[in-house]
Structures are given as structure tokens and as C-alpha cells.
């Protein structure tokens, strides 16, 4: 599983669904063609399903499958293992600073993404 695929599943587990793949494109800074391929792969693995959007006939609602919900704890453990491998040579203080830095980046990214969405709304 790629990092992009994991981020999509993790996000869907938190949000429940996304009404359009375009949301992921904006949030992850992916172009629509690349995002379509990532979603196609997840769908082929049986981890997400596309449903016609109730609000907009032109878009597709993305949802996790039961298989994805079952696999997610294992995927999270694997992701945590990868992160821990990167941090294994850090001392406790460096790990703490690094963690604080990434939390701050996530907050700024969320603020930036929300600001962009606000600007794009009519």
C-alpha cells in the first residue's frame, strides 16, 4: 500500500465518506489523473467503493468497505512502525521536537486547506 492510499483510507475512516475525489486532490495536492489511479487501485483491492452522489449526479461519493475497516488497525500499526524506524536514532528530546513540528505543520496545512476552500466557495 502506498502512502497516498493509506492517507485516503485514514481520512475516510475519520470523515466516513467524501462526496468527490476532487476533495482529496485539493487536500493532498494531487492532480485528478493521479488521484483517479490511486482510487482505482484502492477499489480494485476492495478497500473503497464508489457510489453516485446524492447531491450531485456528476460526482461520486467515496466510502470505505468493511474490508478496509478491518484492515485499518493493521495498516496504522505498519505506518507507526515506519515512522518509528525513521525516529529510531533520535534521542527523546529530538523525537519530541520532531513530533511538535509535524503537529504544527498539520495544523497549518489544515488552516491553509480551509482558507482555500473558503476562497473557492461562491
Image (cartoon, helix red, strand yellow):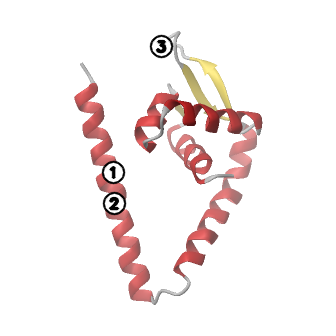
Residue shown at 42% from the left, 41% from the top = 27
Which badge, 1 or 3, is on the more N-terminal residue?
Answer: 3
Is 58 located above or below residue 82 in the figure? above
Q: Is residue 107 left or right of residue 79?
A: left
Find out whether the residues at labels 2 and 1 contact each other: C-beta distance under 8 Å: yes
Residue shown at 37% from the left, 56% from the top = 106
Disc 3 secondary structure class: loop
Q: Position of residue 81 (x, y in %)?
A: 63, 71
Disc 1 secondary structure class: helix
The quadrant of the image that shows the C terminus is top left
**Could you classify mark 2 by the number of other residues whose Cα lies within 10 Å: few (under 14), some (14-19), or many (20 or more)?**
few
Q: In the image, which disc is placed on residue 101?
A: none
Is 118 located above or below residue 114 in the figure? above
Disc 2 secondary structure class: helix
**Could you classify mark 1 by the number of other residues whose Cα lies within 10 Å: few (under 14), some (14-19), or many (20 or more)?**
some
Q: In the image, which disc is placed on residue 55?
A: 3
Q: Is residue 70 left or right of residue 84?
A: right
**Could you classify mark 3 by the number of other residues whose Cα lies within 10 Å: few (under 14), some (14-19), or many (20 or more)?**
few
Q: Position of residue 64 (x, y in %)?
A: 65, 36
Q: In the image, which disc is placed on residue 105?
A: 2
CA separation, marks 1 and 3? 27 Å
CA separation, marks 2 and 1? 6 Å
Amino acid at each position: 500500500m502506498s502512502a497516498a492510499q493509506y492517507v485516503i483510507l485514514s481520512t475516510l475512516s475519520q470523515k466516513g465518506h467524501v462526496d468527490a475525489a476532487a476533495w482529496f486532490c485539493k487536500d493532498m495536492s494531487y492532480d485528478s489523473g493521479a488521484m483517479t489511479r490511486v482510487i482505482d487501485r484502492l477499489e480494485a483491492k476492495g478497500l473503497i467503493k464508489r457510489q453516485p452522489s446524492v447531491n450531485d449526479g456528476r460526482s461520486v461519493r467515496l466510502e470505505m468497505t468493511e474490508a478496509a475497516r478491518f484492515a485499518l488497525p493493521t495498516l496504522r500499526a505498519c505506518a507507526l512502525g515506519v515512522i518509528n524506524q525513521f525516529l529510531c536514532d533520535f534521542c527523546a528530546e529530538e523525537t519530541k521536537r520532531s513530533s511538535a513540528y509535524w503537529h504544527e505543520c498539520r495544523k497549518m496545512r489544515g488552516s491553509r486547506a480551509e482558507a482555500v476552500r473558503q476562497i473557492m466557495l461562491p
